[in-house]
């Protein structure tokens, strides 16, 4: 199994600490989504909250990527997670005092989104430096598994807590969970950073160097494209689950927690399936990854067609399995050959593609759901994207064959 990074006590400590922070983040995700639905019963509002959570990454992640490549990444991650905890406390106070409104909910989503825009390049620059370079691929897989375990547990815990103790107390629990994560982060040790010197260029010159590196490196460019399409449609659909759980199947907050948790189960299985495979070779994106995106998009159509709760849970889990397999493979392809002082900039562009695609997809899906019905919107977007991407992959396959002759 590709789990060699766990031999490092430093990395094991990170995995333990991040479990608390990730649990808080996933509980936060379901709580904010449920608040949006409870306040308005509008799929557009749920989509808007998801949009503002992810949209800042589109603009700000590349800027934060240059920042991360220039500063002490351990200090940066402690600052970012401390701000995340502070915002969680602020949202708890607003809800507990009865001051929460749809406008404030959108504002908090935007602020959480700014923190997320910084967190992506910070986290992706930190974790590879907790181990020796030969274990970077293992780090990507284990971090994804840890992330998706929280994705499975967090929503169901959040949904149960909302039902049992109310939204405000659930938000208080989330804030408390950030504290052990911050403590562990402050005690980590990192291997020395290997520099190419490009991070010390003038700010905008260094930013441009990151864009050029991605564009000129074909495996990374292809990985970004694959991740972007899947994020736009499949991950966008998975961000608008409250209308599916409650609006279509009438399952309430606990049903939303179950739905989000089964997507976590699918993601964990996807992570372990990648861990069972041999380490991925640098410089290439496997054919299985290119094909997985087509399956993921086709499953969006299936989610729109199903008319029973149990089958919807199964399809949502399968979607999450495929998107996780693709995310791990594409991240590994990008991370393996990166210099440490280029990692923040390149992975910030990954965040633009992944988080930005989810933001636009969630907003688009929410508007379409209110205009034509959620299931009809899933069918239309899933069918169109499957046809386009499938056609593109067939074209590229025959183009490669022609070049080899």
Image (tube, helix red, strand yellow):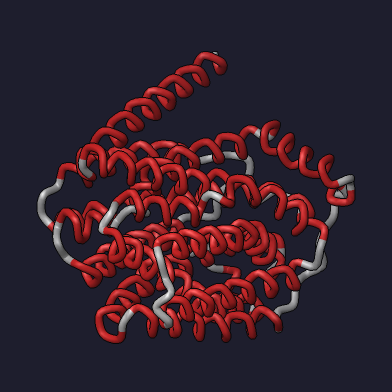
Q: Residue at x 58, y 46 (%)?
A: 58
| Position of residue 27 in the picture relative to residue 89 (left or right) | left
Where's residue 236, x and y in %?
39, 47
Q: Name the image quarter holding the C terminus.
A: top right
Q: Residue at x 84, y 40 (%)?
A: 205
Q: Is residue 194 above or below residue 292?
A: below
Where's residue 364, x and y in %?
38, 41
Q: Residue at x 35, y 32 (%)?
A: 385
Q: Is residue 249 above or below residue 333?
A: below
| Position of residue 155 in the picture relative to residue 185 (left or right) | left
> Of all residues shown, which one is farthest toward the left?
308
Front residue of 316/36: it is 36
| Position of residue 60 in the picture relative to residue 325 (left or right) | right
Q: Is residue 9 visible?
A: yes
Front residue of 267/65: it is 65
Where's residue 55, x and y in %?
53, 49
Front residue of 102/405: it is 102
| Position of residue 18 in the picture relative to residue 297 (left or right) | right
Front residue of 288/310: it is 310
Q: Is residue 137 visible?
A: no
């Amino acid at each position: 199994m590709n789990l060699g990074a766990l031999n490092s006590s430093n990395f094991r400590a990170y995995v333990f600490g991040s479990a608390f922070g990730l649990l808080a983040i996933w509980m936060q995700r379901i709580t904010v989504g449920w608040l949006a639905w409870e306040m308005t019963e509008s799929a557009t509002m749920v989509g808007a909250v998801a949009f503002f959570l992810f949209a800042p990454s589109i603009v700000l992640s590349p800027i934060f990527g240059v920042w991360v490549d220039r500063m002490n990444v351990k200090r940066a991650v402690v600052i970012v997670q401390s701000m995340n905890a502070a915002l969680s406390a602020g949202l708890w106070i607003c809800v507990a005092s009865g001051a929460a409104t749809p406008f404030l909910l959108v504002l908090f989503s935007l602020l959480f989104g700014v923190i997320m825009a910084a967190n992506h390049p910070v986290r992706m620059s930190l974790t590879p430096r907790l181990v020796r370079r030969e274990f970077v691929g293992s780090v990507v897989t284990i971090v994804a598994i840890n992330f998706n375990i929280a994705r499975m547990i967090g929503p169901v815990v959040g949904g149960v807590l909302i039902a049992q103790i109310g939204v405000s107390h659930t938000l208080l629990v989330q804030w408390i969970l950030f504290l052990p994560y911050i403590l562990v982060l402050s005690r980590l040790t990192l291997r020395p950073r290997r520099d190419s010197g490009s991070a010390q260029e003038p700010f905008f010159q260094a930013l441009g160097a990151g864009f050029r590196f991605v564009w000129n490196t074909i495996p990374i460019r292809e990985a970004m494209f694959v991740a972007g399409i899947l994020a736009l449609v499949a991950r966008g659909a998975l961000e608008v689950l409250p209308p599916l759980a409650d609006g279509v199947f009438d399952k309430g907050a606990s049903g939303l927690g179950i739905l989000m948790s089964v997507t976590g189960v699918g993601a964990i299985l996807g992570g372990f399936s990648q861990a069972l495979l041999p380490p991925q070779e640098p410089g290439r994106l496997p054919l299985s990854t290119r094909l997985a995106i087509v399956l993921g998009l086709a499953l969006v159509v299936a989610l729109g067609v199903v008319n029973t709760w149990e089958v919807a849970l199964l399809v949502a889990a399968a979607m999450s399995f495929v998107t996780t397999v693709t995310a791990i493979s594409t991240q590994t392809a990008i991370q393996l050959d990166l210099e440490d002082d280029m990692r923040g900039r390149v992975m910030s562009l990954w965040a633009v593609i992944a988080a930005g695609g989810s933001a636009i997809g969630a907003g688009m899906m929410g508007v379409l759901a209110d205009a034509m019905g959620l299931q009809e919107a899933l069918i239309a977007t899933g069918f169109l994207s499957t046809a386009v991407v499938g056609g593109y992959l067939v074209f590229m396959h025959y183009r490669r064959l022609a070049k080899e002759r």
